[in-house]
Image (spheres, rainbow, N blue to C red):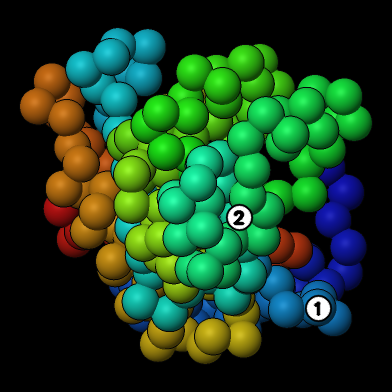
Amino acid sequence: MFRGKKYQNAAKQIDKSNLYDTGEAMDLVVKTASAKFDETVELHVKLGVDSRHADQQVRGAIVLPHGTGKTQRVLVFAKADKAEEAKAAGADFVGDMDLVERIQKENWFDFDVVVATPDMMGTVGRLGKVLGPKGLMPSPKAGTVTPNVAQAVKEIKAGKVEYRLDKTNIIHCPIGKVSFGPEKLTENFNALMGAIVKAKPAAAKGQYIRSCTVASTMGPGVKINGAKLV
């Protein structure tokens, strides 16, 4: 794979065979980010579980201490009082069947997170085939199916992130922007990793954290010593 000069120069600063301490890794991620925009820093964690088994799923959500640096656009499916509560809490879009039809007919996806009250899930279920593949389907585990829509909206706006395994047993999750600096990125990283470690399924055997890497949008990956995190 061809990499530009900036990437190659950045990669030279990182020892690929080394497992760095968290603070040192965040330092390197910030130093090696060379894009003209404020790059997002992502965490990639490979876990020693098998996501094909229901009892080895790892999924949840956490509000990062310093947020993600991105303002999430929140869509809420709710009626009557709950709809008013969602609007008051700062939801970007609130509705019920009107929004379902807009998504189905117009292929409209100008939102980042979907929240729904439990009584709306029958309606939202019609969108499973389009929301599911995009990772937008509300779920109780992620706190996005809840009667307390106002709290859910406020938490998402404050920097709540959802973490979940992909098919290769890896969690990919943003932990902030390069402009946060190493200290805030470390605090966000520690909060997210703490949640992932706590979420270890009882059925998981052997080494839980197989590998842990952080990288900015355009920068090289920096490996972190996962043994120190468990």
- The x, y position of residue 228, in whole percent, is 19, 61
Amino acid type for the residue under numbered disc 2: Val
- Identity, as a three-letter code, of the amino acid under mark 1: Phe
- Is disc 1 in contact with disc 2, using a CB cutoff of under 8 Å? no
Residue farthest to the top? 53
Report helix, strand or loop for mark 2.
strand
**Quarter of the image where one finds residue 102:** top right
Say whether residue 54 is left or right of residue 131. Answer: left
Classify residue 103 as left or right of residue 55.
Answer: right
Label placed on residue 37: 1
Q: Residue at x 87, y 69 (%)?
A: 5
* Above or below, comparing residue 6 to residue 104 in the picture: below
Q: Report the disc number at residue 22.
A: none
Residue at (86, 30) in percent of width and height: 107
The answer to whether residue 2 is visible is: yes
For disc 2, the marked residue is: 74
Foreground residue, 124 or 112? 124
Of circles 1 and 2, which is in front? 2
Residue drawn at point x = 49 percent, y = 68 percent = 89
Q: Name the spot of residue 51 as percent of width and height, x first.
A: 36, 19
